[in-house]
Amino acid sequence: MQNLNVNSERYTLNMGPQHPSTHGVLRIVADFDGETCVSADPQIGYLHRGMEKLLESRTYVQGMPYTDRLDYLAGVNNNLPYALAVEKLLGVEIPERASLLRMLSCEIMRLASYMVGIGIYIMDLGAVSAVFYPYQQREYALEVMSALCGARMTQGYIRFGGVQADWNEQCDAALQKLLDEFPPFLEMYHKLVDENEIFLHRTKGVGVVTAEQAKAYGLTGANLRASGVSYDLRRDAPYCLYDRFKFKVPVQQAGDCHARYVQRMEECEVIYQLIKDIYAALKETEGGEIMGKVPKVLRVPAGEAYAQTENPKGIMGCMVASDGKTNPLRVHFRRPSFDNIAIYSELMPGHKMADLVTIIASFDIVLGEIDA
Amino acid sequence: MLNNVEIAGKQQVAAEFAARFADKIELIENTDSEYMVQAEVLLPAAEYLLSAGYEFLADITAVDYLAEGKFRLIYQVGNYQNGDLITLKVEISREEPQVNSLCAVWKAANWLEREVYDMFGIEFAGHPDLRRILMWDGFEGWPLRKDFVHQPTKYQGRRRLD
């Protein structure tokens, strides 16, 4: 839209890579006409570590810690697709308790990741205080992981064939703390943010992604569901033991930045319920095996396998190609944030400068994953 | 728009592939949804998949089989309605690494193909904006090829910014 009464000049604005609202080192080269964006080109690669190349020269087991560093806000969720893909080639059976522990740790870290997603989103809109409440909840979630496997953020908890450590009493106490603290927090946070007029003005009708656009660009996760497409791998193509559990998949129709906030808040409730259900199921398998029968030195049969999981940011996929040696021939990750931000160059034009910040924040991206 | 389209399942896709692309597309043994596709029918096969409700291009990647002189491109195509996943595998020669771009079918192909181009140097014919995405402009070589020569000292002693 051009306002002919105003003498404006087209100029190029470089946003990032060092910019507090780009969630890391995303760089957006945008052309503006006055205050309105006319074209945007996201530039990525500033955090590229060549992870796929590194994995080729390491054994399968040595590769596992690298996956934690993809989406570093939820390390354990990234272990899972890599483990599932290799296990497909190995053909090992995963004990029930190990599967439940995988799911439980993934759900806990999913909650922790959503806490960052929501908190940083509101902070980018100017409400700095609103970031600390979710971070407190994230802290409780990280305490559970710390008690479970000894690491807070990059856990590497999942092993080929099972998991690293069994559930213990400290985990019980830590998880109970999280379960007790979370519902009052959610209620309080709704009161704090939902009706805030500035928040509503800055998010409603901004960055609208239609269902058609979302599908064409391969959006996944909460960003897809906020556009009215009900697709959640945990329900639609279950892995681990998700088919045992019944849970709601919330959907929003609006597809704007506000819908993405509402979507994440609603999903938090689902995750909370799922954690409770999985925890109850875990209690019934007390004393079960946590590791399947996997040889010490992994020689993975030749072939190609692809596994995908529903991660906090969207669908994470892992393709492993093996030629029968102890190190993979090729490992490739489908990183959800990478596919999610491809839409920016179509979504951003027509918006004001400040809305660009809102759009980036609402997508809940993480650069470790985009750049691999 | 696509709500009216009947949702094709894996069997229907298999039947349709067999009918339309008789000897150009083969089902890989011991799988129900992985196909070896000849490069010249990749585009029509992709168009059929989209029309059959497979709207979700999940992933494009490549594997360098240096000994056989081939790149194998691997496409993962999903279905938002029933959670199906179809895998298309395309083999192209290393000497002339070129294949049709799928940007016109799925917009998601744009960045995915750019990544494959960046890492393997595979040309995607018909891609609107084929340039490096993760590595910087002016980077030489294709890092994920098996014959890529690693030069650890190449950038030592140079100023990063001119």
Image: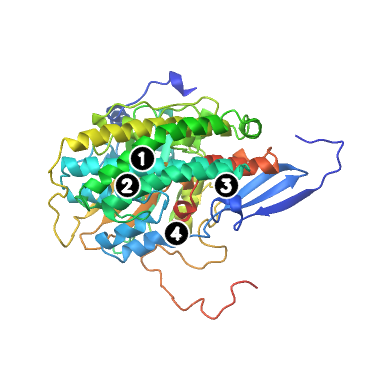
User: Could you tell me which chain the residue with mark 4 belongs to?
Assistant: B
Q: Amino acid at mark 4?
A: Met
Is B151 rendered above or below residue A231? below
Please state, as top left, top right, bottom left or bottom right, where the C terminus of chain B lies in the image: bottom right
How packed mark 4 is, by other alpha carbons closer than 10 Å (few <14, some 14-19, many 20 or more), is: many
Q: Amino acid at mark 2?
A: Val
How packed mark 1 is, by other alpha carbons closer than 10 Å (few <14, some 14-19, many 20 or more), is: many
Q: Position of residue A257 (x, y in %)?
A: 57, 34
- Label whose residue precedes the other's in the sequence (1 or 2): 2
The answer to whether marks 3 and 4 mark residues whose Cβ atoms lie closer than 8 Å is no
Dot 4 lies on which element? helix
The answer to whether marks 4 and 1 mark residues whose Cβ atoms lie closer than 8 Å is no
Which mark lies nearer to you, 4 or 2? Answer: 2
Q: Amino acid at mark 3?
A: Pro
Residue A144's tag is 2
Image quadrant assignment for residue A345: top right
The answer to whether marks 1 and 2 mark residues whose Cβ atoms lie closer than 8 Å is yes
User: Could you tell me which chain the residue with mark 1 belongs to?
Assistant: A
Q: Nearer the viewer, residue A284 or B127?
A: A284
Q: Are marks 1 and 2 on the same chain?
A: yes
- Furthest toward the top, the residue is B4
Q: CA distance from mark 1 to mark 2?
A: 8 Å
Answer whether residue B54 is visible to the viewer in this image: no
Look at mark 4 in the image and give the residue it sits on.
B119
Is A84 situated left or right of B110 in this image?
Answer: left
Q: CA distance from mark 1 to mark 3?
A: 49 Å
Is B89 rendered above or below residue A298? above
User: Could you tell me which chain the residue with mark 3 belongs to?
Assistant: B
Residue A178's tag is 1
Look at mark 3 in the image and give the residue it sits on.
B128
Which mark lies nearer to you, 3 or 2? Answer: 2
